[in-house]
Image (tube, rainbow, N blue to C red):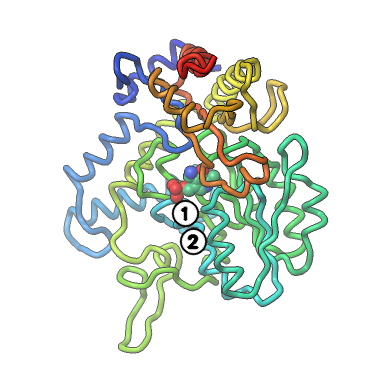
């Protein structure tokens, strides 16, 4: 496992982590919302603008060729990172949200009235609202898979809901609230028996653990660069090439065509078909640098260390009087869970808890974390969430627990 000395070395690459909140050093525990960026990522993006900026794919001049090469190299890199079958299965988007909208809109023509889309109650709004919209437009039905008492997906509920009408199954690879990490290969293998298209929202898994689209047996996976130490405004859609090739474009305009007549156009093949307009080369280059950064630490190491921090925090929060956890259950060291600790404090609003923690330098998030149906299902309006990265230290977990324990006192409540 990563040692505290190694973590301290890694932290030196993240200038923002030296921020002070008043006179207190920042403890950044909002990594599920966005991760901080290492110097390497910031420099890669700056360097692109300093030395290679041009509109790619269109020019014959030196800078345009450099921009094209950088962009296409990153596509190759992402393909390798996700274990895609082909490089052109990687489509760059603005983020996971755009990737999921792209899928909803371009898969919609396949849906007939009465068809079903199956998602889980764990889903982030990004993997929920596009399906609500498309289901309504096509007369299809949006169905939900619920949870067992451990907050795992309920397999028997899944078996009961899968049927010949199920055309799309879209499931999170890791919940941004409960940390549930379903065994997706099992879920997708079953869905394939009914011929459903299998999608995973892997936004919260990819920064924390090895990820292999082939092992999963998925058809599509989406993620966001900013959750994996890369720049904001960049995301990825991976899809099986045969499926991408059978789908219409999502956006129309420059760079996504083979040829254009006055009344019609012949569209380019994937991935270009889905990348209309000027692309975000700087963001993609930053994402490439971020993937190098995490690969150097090693995703197995990251997973092991972050689960260690998460379990330290979970055990400690469970001991605090008045705190209730909403985390997926399971305590063995090998237990797979996301690096999130969701909790509430009896009688204190989560926003007040987060505000008081901020005064102690501790950054956590409060709200429904873009998972309102999940919160309703859990019987609460909102929660607080601490979320961890490999750059967090054991000492930071202690500072978080100390501050959390003191919240009622700091508020003058008890
Ligand atoms: N899915 C999950 C599980 C997420 O946590 C998030 C971001 N909170 C998204 C999708 C959407 O990502 P983005 O806002 O970067 O598009």
Seen in the image, is 195 located left or right of residue 212?
A: right
Q: Residue at x 25, y 52 (%)?
A: 67
Spatial distance from mark 2 to mark 1, Cα to Cα?
A: 6 Å
In the depicted structure, whether residue 141 falls above or below residue 385 = below
Along the viewing direction, whichever of 410 and 263 lies nearer the viewer: 410
Query: 245 or 117, which is in the foreground?
Result: 117
* Residue 299, numbered label: none
Residue 167 rendering spot, x and y as whole percentages: 68, 66
206 or 154: nearer the viewer? 154
Q: Residue at x 49, y 35 (%)?
A: 366
Relative to residue 121, is residue 8 depicted above or below? above
Q: Position of residue 350 (x, y in %)?
A: 52, 32
Position of residue 107 relative to residue 124, above or below, is: below
Give the residue number, with chain letter if any, for mark 1: 97
Q: Which residue is mark 2?
A: 101
Res 82 seen here: no
- Which quarter of the picture shows residue 290? top left
Helix, strand or loop under label 2? helix
Mark 1 lies within 8 Å of ligand 1 (Cβ measured): yes
- In the image, taking residue 336 as reference, residue 22 lies left or right, namely left
């Amino acid at each position: 496992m990563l040692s505290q000395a190694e973590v301290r070395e890694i932290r030196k690459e993240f200038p923002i982590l030296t921020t002070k909140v008043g006179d207190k050093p920042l403890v950044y525990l909002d990594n599920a919302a966005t991760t901080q960026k290492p110097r390497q990522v910031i420099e890669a993006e700056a360097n692109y603008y300093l030395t290679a900026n041009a509109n790619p794919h269109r020019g014959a001049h030196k800078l345009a060729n450099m921009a094209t090469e950088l962009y296409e190299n990153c596509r190759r890199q992402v393909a390798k990172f996700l274990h895609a079958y082909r490089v052109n299965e990687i489509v760059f988007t603005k983020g996971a949200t755009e990737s999921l909208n792209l899928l909803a809109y371009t898969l919609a023509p396949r849906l007939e009235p009465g068809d079903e889309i199956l998602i889980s109650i764990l889903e982030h709004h990004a993997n929920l609202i596009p399906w609500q919209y498309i289901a309504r437009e096509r007369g299809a039905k949006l169905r939900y898979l619920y949870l067992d008492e451990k907050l795992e997906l309920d397999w028997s509920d899944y078996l009961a809901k899968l049927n010949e009408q199920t055309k799309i199954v879209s499931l999170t690879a890791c919940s941004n609230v409960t940390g549930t990490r379903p065994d997706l290969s099992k879920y997708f293998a079953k869905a394939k028996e009914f011929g459903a298209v299998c999608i995973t929202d892997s936004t919260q898994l990819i920064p924390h653990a090895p990820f292999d689209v082939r092992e999963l047996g998925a058809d599509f996976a989406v993620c966001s660069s900013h959750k994996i130490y890369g720049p904001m405004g960049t995301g990825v859609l991976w899809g099986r090439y045969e499926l991408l090739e059978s789908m219409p474009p999502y956006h129309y305009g420059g760079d996504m065509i083979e040829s254009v007549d006055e009344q019609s156009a012949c569209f380019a093949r994937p991935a270009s078909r889905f990348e209309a307009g000027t692309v975000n080369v700087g963001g993609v280059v930053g994402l490439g640098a971020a993937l190098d950064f995490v690969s150097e630490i090693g995703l197995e190491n990251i997973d092991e260390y972050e689960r260690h921090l998460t379990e330290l925090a979970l055990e400690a929060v469970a001991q605090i009087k008045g705190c209730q956890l909403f985390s997926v259950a399971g305590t063995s060291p090998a237990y797979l869970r996301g690096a999130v600790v969701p909790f509430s404090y009896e009688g204190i609003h989560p926003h007040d808890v987060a505000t008081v923690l901020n005064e102690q330098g501790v950054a956590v998030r409060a709200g429904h974390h873009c998972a309102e149906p999940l919160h309703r299902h859990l019987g609460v309006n909102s929660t607080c969430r601490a979320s961890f990265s490999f750059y967090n230290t054991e000492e930071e977990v202690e500072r978080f627990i100390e501050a959390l324990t003191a919240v009622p006192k700091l508020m003058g409540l008890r």
